[in-house]
Amino acid sequence: MAMQTERITRRKLSDEVLERLLRLISNGNLKAGDAMPSERELMERFGVGRPAIREAMQSLANMGLVSISHGERARVQDLTAQSIIRQVDVSAHLMLQRSPDSLEHLKQARLFFERGMVREAAVKATAEDVARLRANVEEQRAALGRAEAFMEADMRLHTQIAAISGNPIFVSVSEAMLGWLKAYHTELLIWSGKENYTLAEHMVIVDAIAKGDADAAEAAMVQHLQRSSGLYGLKG
């Protein structure tokens, strides 16, 4: 009976350094805002050359765990849901550019997400939350004819609805999906009259949240997103 091959792969020095640096951050020896040890200190501590240290530090930066500025010591970053999700922004845009299916999947995911968020908002919204949403709709109304400002107010309203949940991960997911979709907006709405549809739909959504009617809020959100879905597409 032939023996199964189990090759032992020699790890790169930079991988070993990375593992040890990750341990220093995860166990709290290095906290958010702390300066990382200098390259020379790390070289002496781990007994490795400068290339291994630099490669490991770059890996930490790519993960969003440290910030590297020219001429300054790298610093440990405060990890938040927002900073973590931002790490995938470039990859998400590349995926969407390459695949019409991915864009459709994103639209479907957003619809699923927003249905849950608006129901949560209808249950949890305070008078202050509702006032904030109504003020946003008025800001959007004031931005009629200014496409960029109108879209920013649009995105802000959806993020405010997610924020009523009290869960920062929901807010970060909302911001991420809206940001990814924005790049695939196929028209700026100035002449099309669709701005007024959007405003009217937003008012219905906010009214349902104000009444605490989760079913009506969900139905209004579904109608709004299904109507506006066609405004997002890959450019030829």
Image (cartoon, grey):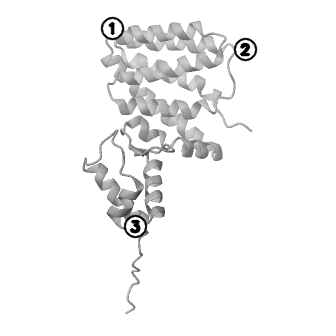
Q: Residues within 10 Å of mark 3 (few under 14, many from 20)?
A: some
Q: Nearer the viewer, mark 3 or mark 1?
A: 3
Residue 194 in percent (x, y) is at 65, 16
Q: Earlier in the sequence, mark 3 or mark 2?
A: 3
**170 with respect to 51 (left or right):** left
**Image quadrant of residue 42?**
bottom left
The residue identified by callout 1 is: 127
Residue 166 in percent (x, y) is at 32, 25
**160 with respect to 108 (left or right):** left
Q: Earlier in the sequence, mark 3 or mark 1?
A: 3
Q: Which element carries disc 2, helix, strand or loop?
A: loop
The residue identified by callout 2 is: 191
Specify the amino acid type for callout 1.
Ala
**Image quadrant of residue 35?**
top left
Disc 3/disc 1 C-alpha distance (Å): 60 Å
Query: Hey, which residue is sitting farthest right in the picture?
Result: 236
Q: Which element carries disc 3, helix, strand or loop?
A: loop
Specify the amino acid type for callout 2.
Trp
The residue identified by callout 3 is: 48
**192 with respect to 164 (left or right):** right
Query: Hey, which residue is sitting farthest bottom in the picture?
Result: 1
- The total of numbered circles placed on residues is 3
Q: Earlier in the sequence, mark 1 or mark 2?
A: 1
Residue 227 in percent (x, y) is at 59, 23
